[in-house]
Image (tube, helix red, strand yellow):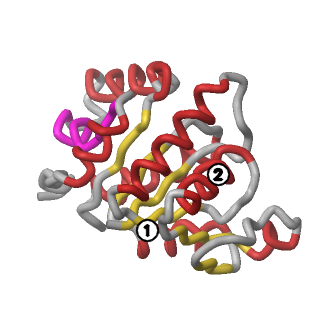
Amino acid sequence: MRIAVFCGSAMGVDPDYEASARALATSMAAAGHELVFGGGRVGLMGVVADSALAAGGKVIGVMPQALRDREIQHTGLSELYVVEDMHQRKAKMAELADGFVALPGGVGTLEEIFEAWAWAQLGYHNKPCAFFNVKGYFDQLLAFVNTMVSQQFLAASHQQMLIISEEIKTLVQEIEDYSAPPNKWE
């Protein structure tokens, strides 16, 4: 299974973010899963790639040319796709991946996982979307998702599409076992 990981191009202030990114990538590689990610060598992105590679895993990067030109490309990947822009990056990652996981990160991380989730909700794919909720990093965001449901802007079944865990073993198992609910218009 190929799993796309969305995460920060920064490390964050808590060293547990790095440790958790390292542990997730190592666990994925040990389970035979391939990593698809943004192709960078910086922040948690670099940690995830380095850790999966060190564990013998296959790591596939997808990077826009403009970011490659800024020399933030990871140079030790199994494969690297260079695309024109961020739209093509997300489309290529979605094409390559069998599932998606968000680790702590910023605006880009949220935008990527929310787009993957929106596509799943609309039935463009039936792939799992997960949040690795390291030390409750996503708690406030997930509370807002509850607000979307309570205000009837999101069906509870589409909220339940999300896999949320602080435990790597549970997260990976739920991704492997995922079965998509009906899409929004069924």
Front residue (pair 58, 17): 58
Which residue in the structure is indicated by mark 1?
Answer: 94
Q: Name the residue under label 2.
A: 45
Between residue 181 and residue 17, name the one nearer to us.
Answer: 17
Query: Residue drawn 76% across and 67% down?
Result: 73
Q: Distance between the residues labelled 1 and 2?
A: 17 Å
**Residue 14 position (above or below residue 40):** above
Indicate the quadrant containing the N terminus: top left, top right, bottom left or bottom right.
Answer: bottom left
Which is more N-terminal, label 2 or label 1? 2
Q: Which residue is drawn at 43% across and 74% down?
A: 96
**Magenta span of residues:** 156-165
Instruction: Tell me where residue 116 sits by quadrant.
Output: bottom left
Q: Is residue 108 magenta?
A: no
Q: Which residue lies furthest to the right in this view?
A: 70
> Residue drawn at (74%, 71%), measured in percent from left and top?
75
**Is residue 136 placed above or below 125 in the rendered structure?**
above
The amino acid type, in three-letter code, at marker 1 is Ala
Q: In which quarter of the image is the C terminus?
A: bottom left
Q: Which of pointers 1 and 2 indicates the residue nearer the eye?
A: 2
Name the residue nearer the viewer: 186 or 102. 102
Quick one: SS at disc 2? helix
| 84 relative position to 33: left or right | right
Residue count near mark 1 (Cα–Cα under 10 Å), binned few <14, some 14–19, many ≥20: many
Mark drawn on residue 28 = none
Q: Which residue type does callout 2 highlight?
A: Met
Give left or right: position of 113 versus 177. Answer: right
